[in-house]
Image (cartoon, rainbow, N blue to C red):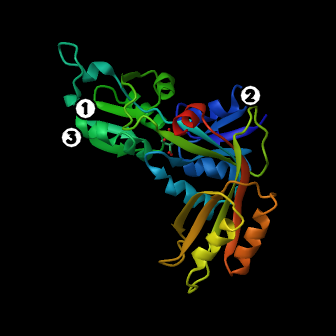
Amino acid sequence: MKSIAVLPQGSVSHEALLHLFNGEPVKLVHHKLISDVFLSTANGTTDYSVIPIENTIEGSVSLHIDWLINEVDLPMQTEWIFPSIQNLIGNPREFTDTDGNKDFTKMVKILSHPVAMAQCMQFVRKHAPWAELESVGSTSEAVEIVKNNPGKGWAAIGTALGAATHGLEIVDRQITDHNNNYTRFVLVGPQKIDLPRSSTGVKTSVLVTLPEDFPGALHQVLAAFSWRKLNLSRIESRPTKKKLGTYYFYIDVLEPIESVLLPGAIEEISALGCQVRILGSYPTYTYEEEKAEVQ
Ligand SMILES: O=C(O)C(=O)C[C@]1(C(=O)O)C=C[C@@H](O)C=C1
């Protein structure tokens, strides 16, 4: 049975993983921090790690992309999209007035994962702008902390599964600022994986470092893809962390690495003096509702 490292039970990552495996038995190894999720597969304890890398509202989860680039050498083996549905979770009796109406004036503190918190900032500013905000390692850790601190006016932003896991109630349902809130997850690990569902596409993620003092280098890199009509779905720059003003370009190409034209493009880019690293070439799975909304 495959073993998979993932954030704690009831996190969005956990929900997303259950969706991807669609009932196929897997051994889950939960970790409080995403760094430990990465390290678990990097040091061989688990076969794969679940990593959130991009969100509709918040954009790239930069910390996780930086880990993939700088801290570990774990190929991406699959990518899938899953909705992040966030709720306000706590003990409703703490947030109800004497007439039984919702009353957030006693909300002292709201805890969540920083990405989940950012997805709900309009709600927070509107209903409890006075509340202290505290970031923790996952939405489910936030729920657990609230559960362990009753009567203090604390609430968590998290999933319905997180509320059920820790025996707390949903005070307000679906509080995300935009309805179409999806997260792109990747499964990283040394081995390819076969999944019990059919993929919706294939992608290759490439990391390109440009040579210094080469005017027009990025233009030439992009030209190597464009004249071959290789479709790019994302390009993003990240600091190399080695010298101020030097960047990697993270590029997603909608082709498998073994396609006819992609190896030629990579050769051409290397010949320009760029360093090229393949982060993975893998199947992608689109969430059905998201596909319908985008079309
Ligand atoms: O805290 C969680 O529940 C997570 O799975 C982490 C995470 C993230 O790192 O982006 C995953 C998806 C959500 O959109 C918000 C938080």
Residues packed near mark 3 inside 10 Å, few (<14), some (14 to 19) or many (20 plus): some
Mark 3 or 2: the one toward you: 2
Mark 2 or 1: the one toward you: 2
Confirm or deny contact between disc 3 and disc 1 (CB under 8 A).
Answer: yes
Identity, as a three-letter code, of the amino acid under mark 3: Trp
45 on left or right of 177: right
Identity, as a three-letter code, of the amino acid under mark 2: Glu
Q: Is mark 1 on a helix, strand or loop?
A: loop
**Residue 239 locus on image (x, y percent):** 51, 70
Give the mark, 3 or 1, whose residue is nearer the N terminus: 1
Give the mark, 3 or 2, whose residue is nearer the N terminus: 2
184 on left or right of 200: left
Asked if ligand 1 lies within 8 A of label 3, the reply is no
Q: Is mark 2 on a helix, strand or loop?
A: loop
Residue at screen point 34% across, 22% down: 91
Q: Residue 107 carries which label?
A: 1
In the rendered image, the quadrant that contains the N terminus is top right
In the rendered image, the quadrant that contains the C terminus is top right
Kindly indicate the quadrant of the structure image that contains residue 120.
top left
32 on left or right of 98: right
Pick whichever, 27 or 191, lies toward us: 191
Identity, as a three-letter code, of the amino acid under mark 1: Met
Q: Mark 3 points at which residue?
A: 130
Q: How much space separates mark 3 and mark 2, taking CA atoms?
A: 45 Å
Kindly indicate the quadrant of the structure image that contains residue 278.
bottom right
Residue at screen point 19% across, 30% down: 105
Asked if residue 75 can be seen in this view, the reply is: no
Q: Mark 2 points at which residue?
A: 24
Q: In this view, does 221 lie above or below 169?
A: below
Q: Which mark is residue 126?
A: none
